[in-house]
Amino acid sequence: MTLAKGTDTVLAWRKSTFSGANDDCVETAPTATAVAVRDSKDLAVGNFAVPNHSWARLTEALKR
């Protein structure tokens, strides 16, 4: 799933609290139907989105 170009300017991007002061991390932003993901060190690459239900499964699996 891909978000439209320019969409990232209206999204509320956030970095993990585990990333600390380091700018080399992945950022996420929730939308109504998905979670957008982008590389914070190379914003020109763009972003992609994962459907909410898939993102929930992924994060639950990572907690184990």
Image (tube, rainbow, N blue to C red):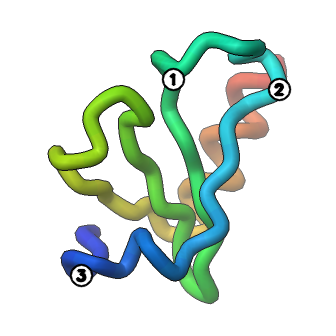
Of the residues shown, which amino acid type is indicated by label 2?
Thr
Alpha-carbon span between mark 2 and mark 1: 11 Å
Q: Is residue 62 left or right of residue 37?
A: right
Q: In this view, does 47 lie to the left or right of 59?
A: left
Q: Which residue is drawn at 39% across and 63% down?
A: 49
Q: Where is residue 21 in the image (x, y as percent from the top left)?
A: 71, 14
> Pointer 2: what residue?
17
Q: Position of residue 22 (x, y in %)?
A: 61, 12
Q: Which residue is drawn at 73% across and 31% down?
A: 16
Tell me the number on the disc at residue 25: 1
Assess whether mark 1 and mark 3 are in contact (beta carbons under 8 angstroms).
no
Alpha-carbon span between mark 3 and mark 2: 27 Å
> Pointer 3: what residue?
4
Q: Position of residue 40 (x, y in %)?
A: 43, 35
**Residue 17 image-quadrant placement:** top right
Of the residues shown, which amino acid type is indicated by label 1?
Cys
Up/down of 60 relative to 12, above or below: above
Q: In this view, does 57 lie to the left or right of 20?
A: left
Q: Quadrant of the C terminus?
A: top right
Residue lying at the far bottom in this picture: please name it.
Answer: 32
